Amino acid sequence: MDVEAMCETMHPKRGMWVRFIRALRLAEYSKRKGFEKLNFLMDVFYNQVYDVWQSKVNSSRLKFDADKTFALLKQRPGLFARSLFSNMLWFGAEETVAHFEEIIDKVPARLVFTLNMYAQNYFDKNMQRSVKPLVEQTNRIGANQLLGLYEDISVGRDENSNREIMSFGYEKTICFSCKYQQNDLYRSTIV
C-alpha cells in the first residue's frame, strides 16, 4: 500500500492516530536508519498532503458536476446508497436513481430495504429524524434543508406494483425499489 493510501485510510480517525503516534514516540523511530518509509508516512500525514475520497466527492458536488460525483460514488456503492436521498435532492431524483440502478447489484439487500423503509420519513419536511451516535444519547435533527427547494414531495404506494413512489412537484415521478423479485433478493443475501 502506498503512503497516500495509508494516510487516506488513517484520516477518518486522525485524532486517534495523532495521539497514537505521540504515545508510541514514532517520531523518534522514524529518524532511525531503516524507518524511512515511516518518516515519509508521518511527514505526509502531519502536513496533510494527501487527497481523501470524500473530499473529492464533496468538491465535485459543490461544483454541481454530476458526472464526476456519480463516477466517484459508483466506486463505493455502500456510501452511494447511504447518500442516495441527499443526492436525489441535490442533483434531481431521476438522474440519481438512474445512476444508482447501475450499481444496485453491489449494495447489500438489507441496506436497500432500509432505504425503502426510511424514504417516507426522509422526504417529509416536518419530520425530525433520530440519530444515535455510539457513545451519546439520541439526538433529534430536522429535515434536510434542501427539501425547502421543492414545492411538494410525496411518498406513497403504487397500486399496480407495490413499490414506493416519490413524486417531486408536478413533473418528476420516480420509483424507489429494487429491480429484483423478493426470491432473487433472498437468494443473494444467503450466498
Image (spheres, rainbow, N blue to C red):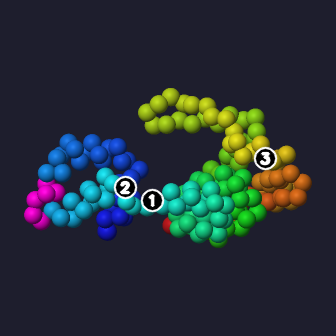
Residue at the spot of label 1: 52
Residue at 23 percent across and 48 percent down: it is 21
Residue at the spot of label 3: 149
Please indicate whether residue 119 sits to the left or right of residue 3 in the image: right
Of callouts 3 and 2, the N-terminal one: 2
The stretch drawn in magenta includes residue 33: yes
Residue at 32 percent across and 44 percent down: it is 16
Span shown in magenta: 29-34
Q: Taking 111 as reference, is 147 above or below it?
A: above
Residue density around tag 2, few if under 14, some if 14–19, many if 20 or more, within 10 Å: some
- Estimate the x, y position of residue 137 in percent, counting from the top left: 50, 28
Residue density around tag 3, few if under 14, some if 14–19, many if 20 or more, within 10 Å: few
Query: Marks 3 and 2: which is nearer the front?
Result: 2
Q: Are marks 3 and 2 in contact (CB under 8 Å)?
A: no
Q: CA distance from mark 1 to mark 3?
A: 30 Å
- Estimate the x, y position of residue 56 in percent, counting from the top left: 52, 61
Q: Tag 1's secondary structure?
A: loop
Residue at the spot of label 2: 48
Residue at 82 percent across and 53 percent down: it is 168
* The quarter of the displayed image where residue 8 is located: bottom left
Amino acid tagged 3: Leu
**Residue 169 can be seen, yes or no:** yes
Q: CA distance from mark 2 to mark 1?
A: 10 Å
Comparing 38 with 166, the one in front is 38
